[in-house]
Amino acid sequence: MTIDVIAIDGPTASGKGTVASLVAQRLGFHYLDSGALYRLCAYACLKHGVDLADEKGCGAAAAGLEPVFKDGRIFLEGEDVTETIRQEAVGIAASKVAMLPAVRAALLDVQRAARKAPGLVADGRDMASVVFPDARLKVFLTASASARAQRRYKQLIDKGISANLRDLTRDLTQRDERDRQRAAAPCIPAPDAHLLDSSGLTIDETVAAVLAWWKRLAA
Ligand code: CDP
């Protein structure tokens, strides 16, 4: 029997992570934050001085990743990197290593191994197009660049990390471009994805929209 997957893709700070984990909670499904794997790979490269454009070196770092997920925390080589990998600098580095096909290939099996009963909600850029093309429900979550920059700003400030809205908007636009323009698994909606613009929606309304699509499918 195939295990159901709900794929939630979209650009940076579109709210996918929050929405995907809440949908998973509501359905009692597992949750895959695929971006965390790219962030971990980028962090490992930065830590070991691997050039972010060195495909062989970054691919080896991705293949050798042995993260430990325990009690909501993430450890890499014994170091608690839960907060470190959320830093903007690591996100930017992640979008650079994510351009490399060797890195994407190395992370494919780890992501597919997350597909476990009773179901999986996976968030990222290519969940619907590459990793789980047979996902039962595909959602592409967007929001305007200014709404996303505001959200990311609030997220960082709430965590006590200093941030500047103008720099965030610039970095976010550059990251969007890199994610959209790359040849390998670009961040674009799958042809069969439902588009959801959350600019004017609360988290709860966005979660409700995804659950309504799911209910309709399950009916
Ligand atoms: O939280 P945010 O949306 O900013 O980023 P993330 O989902 O943690 O992903 C960080 C970076 O990893 C993105 O900018 C993408 O370039 C890359 N990524 C990817 O290429 N494919 C995925 N499935 C997930 C993330």
Image: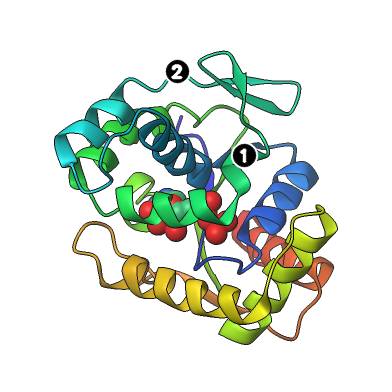
The numbered dot on residue 23 is none
Residue sitting at 64 percent across and 59 percent down?
214
Q: Nearer the viewer, residue 157 or 107?
A: 157
Q: Nearer the viewer, residue 34 or 73?
A: 73
Residue sitting at 36 percent across and 71 percent down?
188
Query: How many C-alpha atoms fall within 10 Å of the one at disc 1: few (<14), some, or many (≥20)?
Result: some
Residue sitting at 60 percent across and 19 percent down?
79
Q: Position of residue 208 (x, y in %)?
A: 78, 66
- Disc 1 residue: CB within 8 Å of ligand 1: no
Residue bearing mark 2? 66
Residue bearing mark 1? 84
Query: How many C-alpha atoms fall within 10 Å of the one at disc 2: few (<14), some, or many (≥20)?
Result: some
- Residue reaching furthest top? 78
SS under mark 1: helix
Q: Quadrant of the C terminus?
A: bottom right
| Residue 51 lies in quadrant | top left
Residue sitting at 63 percent across and 86 percent down?
146
Instruction: Find the distance from the CA under tag 1 to the CA under tag 2.
Output: 17 Å
- Disc 2 residue: CB within 8 Å of ligand 1: no
Residue 39 higher or lower than 207, as above or below: above
Please state if 125 lies on the left or on the right of 211 as rendered.
left
Does label 1 or label 2 sit earlier along the sequence?
2
Q: Position of residue 187 (x, y in %)?
A: 37, 66
SS under mark 2: loop
